[in-house]
Structure formats: C-alpha cells, structure tokens
Image (spheres, coloured by chain):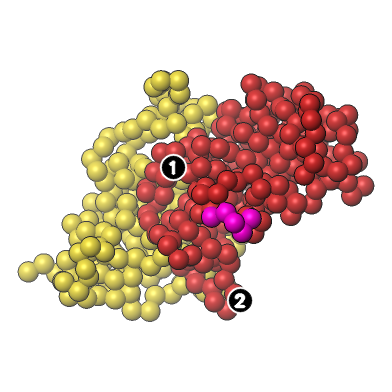
Amino acid sequence: MIDKRFELAAAVADVQDGATVLVGGFGAAGGPIELLHALIDQGARNLTVVSNNTGSGNVGLAALIKHGRVAKAICSFPRTANSTVFQDKYRAGEIELELVPQGTLAERLRAGGAGIAAFYTATAAGTQLAVGKETRRFGDREYVLEYGLRADFALIKCKRADRLGNLVYNKTARNFAPIMAMAAKTTIVQAESYVEAGEIDPEVVVTPGVFVDRIVAIPNPSQESVLVASGASYP
Amino acid sequence: MSEITSKGVGWSRREIARNIALDIPDGSIVNLGIGMPELVASFIPSDREVLFHTENGLLGMGPPPAAGAEDPELINAGKQPVTAIPGASYFHHADSFAMVRGGHIDICVLGAMQVSQRGDLANWSMGDGDAAPAVGGAMDLVSGVKTIFIAMTHCASNGAPKIVEKCTYPLTGAGVVRRIYTDLAILEVRDGALDVVAMAPGVDFETLQRHTQASLVKPRVARTA
C-alpha cells in the first residue's frame, strides 16, 4: 500500500550536505516554515537553495541562511523590506548568488521536471543577465538559451494532500510549489490537512501524486508574515 | 527637485495614474508594477472591464481588503494583501509566466529609472556591485507583454533627466517601451524618437525639452488631458 506520510524530522533526515533544495513560497506566502525549521534542526550545510526570494525576518528560509547553511542561492529577487539576512551574507562574501528572471526561473523548473534539457527565451536578451549565455535568432528576435533545473529535494506547502500525494493549494500560496514538486528527486510536502484517497475531486487536483514523495501533516502551519510581524526568530 | 516640479507645475502621481487608466481599453488584461503603477487600478472608468494579472499567480486581482480582512496567502507581486474578484483564477508560476512570456497580457505598467528615446528601459539595477541585485519579473514582463507603459517622474529627485538618448543603467529590455507617462508629459516612442502626445497644464515644449536628455518631436496638435 502506498503511504507517503512522514513525521516532520524523518521527512528531512536524509538531506545531505551540498544538496540542492527547492523552497516554495513567494514573499511570505507559501513558505514551508515547519519543514525549513526541521532542516535547520537537522543541520545540513553547504546547501544550494532555489527560491524566488531569500526569506523574511529571521524565520524560515532567512533563518536557514542566517545560520550559514546555504552556500548558494538561485533566485529572482533576494530582497525584502523586513530582512537583511541575505544582503548581509552577500556583502560579506559568504553566499553566492545566481540571479535569474522570475519567469525564466519558473520555466527552468518546469523544463527540469519535464525532462527538457534547455530552451530558448526572449527574456533577458540584450541584458547583463544574458552575458556569457548562448543566443540564437528565431525570426526577427534574439533568444537566450536557458537550462532546465533539477534538484535533490523540494520543500513545499499545500492546503490539502491525500494518501497518494495529490495536492491542492491555497490562493497565491501556490506560486512555485507545483513546478518545484516536478523538478525534485524527492518532494517533501507539508500539508495543512491530510485526507484519504478519493476525498479530493480528481478534477481539482493541482499536483498529481506522482510528483510527491513525502507528506508531513502540519495542521496549523505558522504564517511567515505573522512570525515576522511578531519579531520571531528561529531557533 | 527639478526647477519645474518644485514650482508645483505638472501632474500629480494620481493624475499620472489617471492619464494611464484612460488609455487602457475595455476588455484589457493588465499587469501593474510596484509603486505608482499600482494607483492605475482605481482610475479605470467604471464602464470598462479590465482584468488585473499579478505574476505570483492570480488573474482577476481586486482592490486591497479592508483592515483586518487581510489573508497572508492572498498577496500581489509587491507582497501586499489583495482580494480576488468574482471570476478570478489562481495558477502556478510557470502558467503565470506563460501568460506573460507567451504574449497573453495586453498592457503592463512599470516604473523606470531611465528610458531611452528608442524605448530601452532600465528599471532593475543601478549597476553598483555592493548590494545583491534583484530582477524579479521585470525582464519577463517587458519581453512578453504586448504593450509597455511607463509611469514615472520626468526627472530623478536630484533633477537628473530620466528620459535620455541612451540609458547608462543596465537595461531591463531594449526597445520595449511604447509610452511614457510623467508629471510633465505623455510621450510615445515612434521610430526611435519621442513624440509628445500631451503636456501637463503650464508646461510648454521648450521647458519639456530642457528637462529631457533626448530629442522630442513637437506635437502638431497638443492634447489637453
């Protein structure tokens, strides 16, 4: 019988030093806070993290970076009004940054997850972010070659998961989660509710269970924005 | 402040937003950048139906919620709480940027640090190496959205012209801007030159040219806005 349920600590226990980890979330919406805190507790270092931002306040992804666990960030917007953690590390030369336009980041994940090695996009053609990349003209436009992105693990959050790993999300907390689930060898989901197979209408499943490996039930997840507003820091 | 804006001449930020809103046709799908562009939504005439897209996964974005009704999982690209109108849809980032990069969004309104007379846009980096750079979705939007409008002050806060012959800041995209809406004028990029579509009350062509580091094409008929 297929059962993807894990306890929180066990779900992240095999994240090895040097792993590439996809982290869902956009701003303070959709960040898998409990999984990130479990990863801090677990202790893996020298990680490459792929995420749109670099965390808020001193919790979640920002806390992982603050504790020196992240060697490299691949992201589109490593700034937030409420956190200086990434900027401080960057200025100190303690973290590497690969800056990727947001749509290119999304497409690289989708491509990686779909077995597509690379693709051409008009985004960033003629800009600094295309320097050193292959370009090619199709018709009257220049396009930039971008590579699909795959990772060892994805940490994402959803609203509801069933026993087979089918997922639905909540509003704009969905953001990168479905494509990160596709692009990781091992996708770890924290779900606000866990239900039996059949309880999610197949017509409304957003992420089919084939893309999901581990489900951790977190019934009342922390909201990153609430933690930040309260001045919390982890641990 | 530049000489002209310090005299209180020119359109206010809200008037710039109104000028843009009046140029958005009924039925348009529109993406609004962070800052002044966000003001555009409230000036869409009530007889037009315009759908707002926010690249973090919502088509049919509504106004901000009432105080106390904010949902931390319903935000816009500027990370501010928003609402969803009846008929809205949520989707993941690759679908959202397929809308952007696939040419399914009609108009995007963005802020700018510099715009050149051939429509080059610089709005993501000052080119200094100290702070970590951040680009977000700006390069995707300018490469994929059909029409790019710019909302900005005509000059920087130190008075330096922002409309220039050639951008000195790193480009977001080359030849991507259609129209520039400032406190002093509305300009249209046409064949590598800037046509003056309208000037703010109290602004004459010579004054406008003096505050612009690119050659302007004099209007045949000045529009009153």
- Structural distance between the alpha carbons of marks 2 and 1: 33 Å
Quarter in which the C terminus of chain B is drawn: top right
Q: In this view, does A29 lie above or below B54?
A: below
Q: Name the residue under label 2.
A: B67
Residue A20 picture location, percent across and down: 33, 50
Query: At x 24% / y 43%, what residue is drawn?
Result: A114
**SS majority, magenta:** loop
Whether the residues at callouts 2 and 1 have beta carbons within 8 Å, the answer is: no
Residue A2 lies left or right of residue A123; in this view the side is: left
In which quarter of the view is residue B175 placed? top right
Chain (red) = B
Residue B211 picture location, percent across and down: 83, 33
Q: Residues within 10 Å of mark 1 (few under 14, many from 20)?
A: some
The residues colored magenta run: B45-49
Give the letter of the chain under mark 1: B
Query: At x 79% / y 26%, what residue is drawn?
Result: B220
Of residues A108 and B17, the one drawn nearer to the viewer in this rendering: B17
User: Which label belongs to residue B52?
Assistant: none
Q: In this view, does B143 lie above or below B72?
A: above
Closer to the observer: label 2 or label 1? 1
- Under circle 2, the secondary element is loop
Chain (yellow) = A
Residue B85 picture location, percent across and down: 48, 65
Of residues B83 and A226, the one drawn nearer to the viewer in this rendering: B83
Q: Mark 1 points at which residue?
A: B104
User: Tag 1: residue type?
Assistant: His
Residue A101 seen in this snapshot: no
Residue A160 part of the magenta-drawn span: no
